[in-house]
Image (cartoon, grey):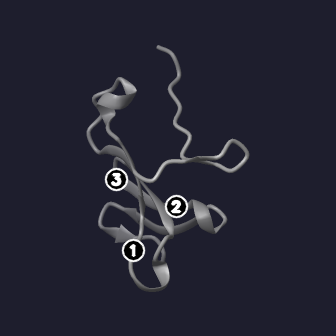
Amino acid sequence: MAKKTWTLIDVDHDVYIDELSIAPADVGGSAAGFGVQKRTLRGGLRDGVDVVEVEAGACRFTLVPTRGMGIWRVRFGDLPANG
């Protein structure tokens, strides 16, 4: 199976994807509990901030690509890992 990639933000090539949702079927799999979503937050100080939410089984985390690719939230099962 050929490797599939998605470019969400690329300043050098003027690429910006506003929203994206990737499910197991999009990568040729059927793994339950897998998904990737990119969205832009709205309202208040967070207005315009992009987040990428990744779910991989029991592990879920949120990246902030427009703020230095920082990790914002992490969860493992029902446990928050960020304090």
Residue extending furthest right?
Answer: 12
> Tag 3: Cα neighbours inside 10 Å, few (<14), some, or many (≥20)?
few
Residue plotted at (29% across, 45% down): 33
Q: Amino acid at mark 2?
A: Leu
| N-terminal-most mark, 1 or 2 | 1
Residue 39 lies, with reference to residue 56, above or below; the image says: below
Residue 7, percent from left and from top: 56, 40
Give the Cα distance between marks 3 and 2.
17 Å
* Left or right of 63 on screen, residue 30: left
Q: Eyeballing the image, is 69 above or below 34?
A: below
What amino acid type is highlighted by mark number 1? Arg
Image quadrant of residue 25?
Answer: top left
Q: Amino acid at mark 3?
A: Ala
Of badges 3 and 2, nearer the viewer stands 2
- Between the C-alphas of marks 1 and 3, the distance is 27 Å
- Residue on which disc 3 sits: 58
Query: In the rendered image, which residue does mark 2 sit on?
Result: 63
Q: Residue at x 39, y 80 (%)?
A: 43
Mark 1–mark 2 distance (CA, rounded to whole Å): 16 Å
Q: Is there any visible trace of residue 83 in the rendered image?
A: no
Indicate the position of residue 10 as horizontal and vertical percent values.
65, 47
Query: Position of 36 compared to 67: left or right?
Result: left
Please give the residue where the numbered disc 1 appears in the rendered image: 42
